[in-house]
Image (spheres, rainbow, N blue to C red):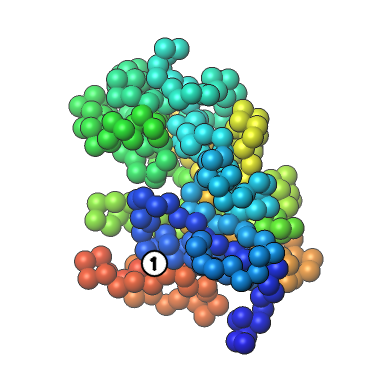
Amino acid sequence: MTVQESCFRSVGRVEPVTRTKPPIADAEEACLTHTAERIARLLQYDYGRVGDPVLDAQQRIYFVPDHTLTAVEAERLGVRTDRDLFGGVVPHAFVATRAATHAPISADADVPQNWSYALARILSGCVLRGFSAFSHGDARLAAQRLLRTGPVRLDCGDTEASRDMLSDMDEFDEALDGIAVIDVATQGVVIEQALAEQTTYVVGRARVANECVSYVGTRRAARIESGCPIHAGCDLAVVPGDFTALDRVGLSTEARYAVLKAARYDEAISHAYRSSFASRRSYDVVLGHDRHGAARMGVRGPSWSVAAESPAEIAAMAAFRDVPGLQCLRASTYEAFGDVDVPSDAMVYYKSDDANRGSLTKYCTIDVQGY
């Protein structure tokens, strides 16, 4: 038995779960695999993949999905509570998307069955001005109304793909035409007020067994590769406990507002769709200025599955477990292009050398002296 194998005990197994279609990118799969393997170490479980033979029928399976599960998917896997997975479960697929954030343009607009009209009213104070749409016609009506007050942003409901600073209907129509009708109908789109000079805060909470952490930080400016924005990473202040534990960190006024808005959003969506549950919840909160120069801050939407911050989340849990009395630490994730000097204590989980885009290294670091 190897040293790595000896740190596991056969009372359970951690399994990553990916969508059948579309296939996830190599870097995303590496992040998922790294996170699942680290969770297995944290739990002292075996590590395997869905479909691998189970040697012990009594083993408990802990799942690490690459997407928020629907109730149907959860039932098929045997996921019943937030202690069965690293991620979340929602009653309907649209609840996990950004499209759940805003109201439709009108009372007779197309929305999914079981849509909560009350949620948008509750969230009005913690999101930017915007609308959700599930048809091209409703999306155009929403854009026409919002463009009267300045540029808009178009998001597809369940992806990071977006078009920002659309200034007129010609630009909006061009962007909207790039989204398939079926995707608009099933995932929705968000038409939202666009902001200049943006800072994106990331606020989250994650739990594995009895290890729970919460954090707030900012995303570093994205680098443009092949015409697409690539996140360059984030820097997080992490504490053991839930969102309220962040009060003991010396946060700036802006960061504190970001935490309050994310916590309010989290509470509202959990209340609106009561059968939802999640062990991992993260929210992007954007701060910027409208066309009149006024500051605006709002939550962009939920992320209840493995994301770029997850390797740092699990590493932070391990650090708090291993260093008694530790109350706060700094966790950082990096997406470094080209030849870089990776710190000796970094956890590297992806490295590629693409002939067209050049090398890319993804890693995370933990600094227990950072706060």
Side (left or right) of 282 relative to 286: right
Q: Secondary structure at mark 1?
A: strand
Side (left or right) of 115 relative to 182: right
Q: Residue at x 39, y 32 (%)?
A: 186
Residue 269 x/y as whole percent:
60, 32
Q: Is residue 208 above or below residue 359?
A: above
Q: Which of these two is toward me, 77 or 291?
A: 77
Q: Residue at x 54, y 40 (%)?
A: 72
Q: Which of these two is toward me, 8 or 215?
A: 8
Residue type for callout 1:
Ala
* Residue pointed to by mark 1: 336
Please count the marks in the image: 1
Q: Quadrant of the C terminus?
A: bottom right
Q: Residue at x 73, y 52 (%)?
A: 241
Residue 81 x/y as whole percent:
67, 47
Side (left or right) of 196 relative to 174: right
Q: Is residue 315 visible?
A: no
Q: Of all residues shown, which one is farthest toward the right? A: 325
Which quadrant of the structure image shows residue 86?
bottom right
Q: Residue at x 40, y 16 (%)?
A: 109
Q: Is residue 101 visible?
A: yes
Residue 142 x/y as whole percent:
35, 20
Which quadrant of the structure image shows residue 117?
top right
Tell me if mark 1 has few (under 14), some (14-19) or many (20+) residues whose alpha carbon lies within 10 angstroms of its own: some
Residue 66 x/y as whole percent:
48, 53
Q: Quadrant of the N terminus?
A: bottom right
Q: Which of these two is toward me, 108 or 81?
A: 81
